Amino acid sequence: MTDRFLLERELKQIIEESLGESLIFGTRMTSYEDHAGEPAVSIAVAMKTSKDIPDARAQSELTHKLRSALAEHSDARFPYLYFDALDNIRVADEDDEFGAAPETTVGN
């Protein structure tokens, strides 16, 4: 297993412990450069229901935990969190930011 794979498993574990594993349908992670050209990781979390999506404070705390874990591994990427839920029915269009599939999937 690669270090990146192990790190992403650790990030997934932090997410599950913070939000409740039973409330999460799946997690996808993609490495990319953000709008400023800095290393980043997009973390899409699909919750089972929209009521399970954490509020802004909980999302901020989770981002801080993930950023700390990345820093402990000397990983300079910033974690950008995106939430959706199975009961949110959306039709993707050309302007949908989440149209591209992530390169790395860490599922339940």
Image (cartoon, rainbow, N blue to C red):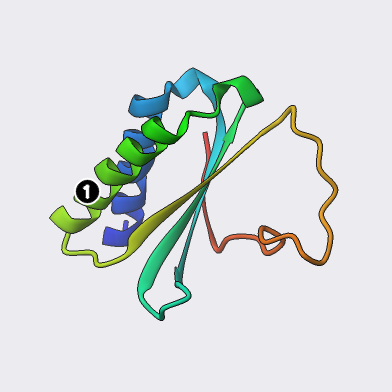
Give the residue at mark 1: 69
Could you say where residue 82 lies in the image, as x and y percent from the top left? 54, 47
**Callout count:** 1
- For image coordinates 35% across by 40% down, the residue present is 60
Q: Is residue 22 left or right of residue 50?
A: left
Looking at the rendered image, the quarter that the N terminus falls into is: bottom left
On the image, which quarter does residue 92 sit in?
bottom right
Up/down of 34 relative to 106, above or below: below
Left or right of 22, for residue 2: left
Indicate the quadrant where residue 50 lies: top right
Can residue 104 be seen at all in this image of the molecule?
yes
Q: Percent from the top left, x then y, of residue 13?
A: 34, 35
Query: Which residue is found at the position 56% from the left and 22% from the top?
Result: 52
Q: Is residue 24 left or right of residue 11?
A: right
Point out residue 77 in the picture as x, y percentages from the top left corner: 31, 65
Residue drawn at x 50%, y 18% is 22
Between 51 and 42, the one lying in front of the other is: 51
> 10 Å neighbourhood of mark 1: few (<14), some, or many (≥20)?
some
